[in-house]
Amino acid sequence: MCMESNYNLGEDVIRAIKKGFETEASNTGKEILQIILKNAEIAREEQAPMCQDTGFTVVFLELGQDVHIEGGDLYEAISAGVAKGYTEGYLRKSIVSHPLDRKNTGDNTPPVIYTTIVPGENLKIVVCPKGGGAENMSAVKMLKPADGVEGVKDFVLEVAKNAGPNPCPPVIIGVGIGGTMEKAALIAKEALLREVGEKSKDPAMAAVEEELLEKINNMGMGPQGLGGRTYALAVHINTYPAHIASLPVAVNINCHAARHQEVIL
Amino acid sequence: MTPIKLTTPLADADVEKLRIGQQVLISGVIYTGRDAAHKRMVDLIKEGKENELPFNPKGQIIYYVGPSPTKPGKVVGSCGPTTSYRMDPYAPELHKLGLKASIGKGKRSPEVIDAMKKYKAVYFAAIGGAAALIAKSIKSAKVIAYPDLGAEAVHEFVVEDFPMVVVNDTLGGDLYQEGMRIYAVK
């Protein structure tokens, strides 16, 4: 799954880039989008990583409550799978064992694993390698409830503007509103797993997604930040109930190499 | 627009004629380095041990990249640019020693832009994320220093027509600001 996700760009991302190509106002921007599509083709044909940054391996597990796992530790098994995939697949090992000592672990472990318990007897595994460049441009802010939806919009626009060319645009912007600080960040990341351009099921949030996408693209940053109208391919918003005192907002940015692979056991 | 072809090493005159937005194809030897390698190089400079640097920066280009491992039968793994601002604290020291260009992606600090004006150097953007495609313009690759850093080791690449765009020129121009100004919807 680690190898598959790094070699094969999803059809939804390809469709979104093609759509951007058709509407892009800048010639350089158009050329860049074409090069990105060509790159995805080469990666698929040669089974080579589309980006040298093959990411922090983020894994989402949905574990059915009727599942009984035998024969060892599930997290250790996932970690072993990551080590095997990154070693055998010639993927870059980008993880250091301590954030300050910074010694490479040599096999891209450990992954970051999030587990939810759900009804049923299946185990769903979503592997989502996340590049460092786009992750570094992400941000969380604890707004005041009085800031409201305008405050949320201003913050998302500010994060996108500050990010500029750094996260390899065209990007996908995941927004998490509500919950606690870490919950907002987590639902922002989960928003990146949505099919690119799929709207929020909440019509009010779907309207905010559309408005933000237009405003972000109208800033003129364009593909790779070199000027144009295709900076973001989509804005995806997730919400969660919030405390009466809080309005947390998280913005998680994904580069155009928006990788994820899913399997249900 | 016809891209400008340049071959390393570069003289002041080669970079002084470049302007923001121009497409350039680079051929010849270039060197790689990311955060960890830059720290070691600049520590050496500060200790006055310039002769111990992995390469003499004069006239050269440094590419901010940490390639993925090389598959059997290939020259190099995927190797697109990493975000440049992390090298900002180190770049002026290298430009002072004659480094003529860096290749990466993303914004540079005012200090780096000033250093490029002062020491006659430019900053190129390669296409971030186009790593499998960029690998095709690399004709040979070898590690020349700091192998313990893995992907962050200093490599010597021989490249042919490696495509990039001028983002900052020797006049202090900045394509990121200029591009945004042109395409912003008022």
Image (cartoon, coloured by chain):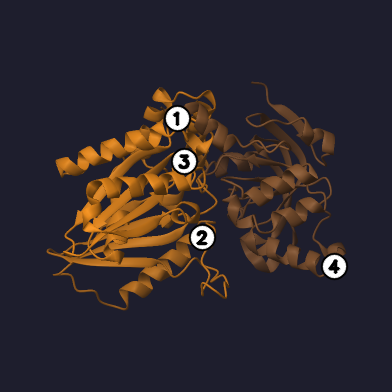
Chain colours: A orange, B brown
The reply to whether the C-beta atoms of the residues labelled 3 and 1 are less than 8 Å apart is no
Q: Residue at x 56, y 37 (%)?
A: B176
Q: Determine which residue is flagged by label 2.
A: A88
Q: Determine which residue is flagged by label 1.
A: B184
The reply to whether the C-beta atoms of the residues labelled 4 and 2 are less than 8 Å apart is no
Element assignment for label 4:
loop
- Say which of marks 2 and 1 sits in front: 1
**Depth check: A209 or B7 in front?**
A209
Q: Specify the quadrant that holds the N terminus of chain A.
A: bottom left
Q: Residue at x 82, y 49 (%)?
A: B98
Residue A17, image quadrant? top left
Give the numbered dot on residue A169: 3
Q: Determine which residue is flagged by label 4.
A: B48
- Say which of marks 4 and 2 sits in front: 4
Q: Could you tell me which chain the residue with mark 4 belongs to?
A: B
Element assignment for label 1:
loop
| Kind of residue at badge 3 | Pro
Percent of width and height locating residue B27:
75, 37
Q: Is residue A107 above or below residue A260?
A: below
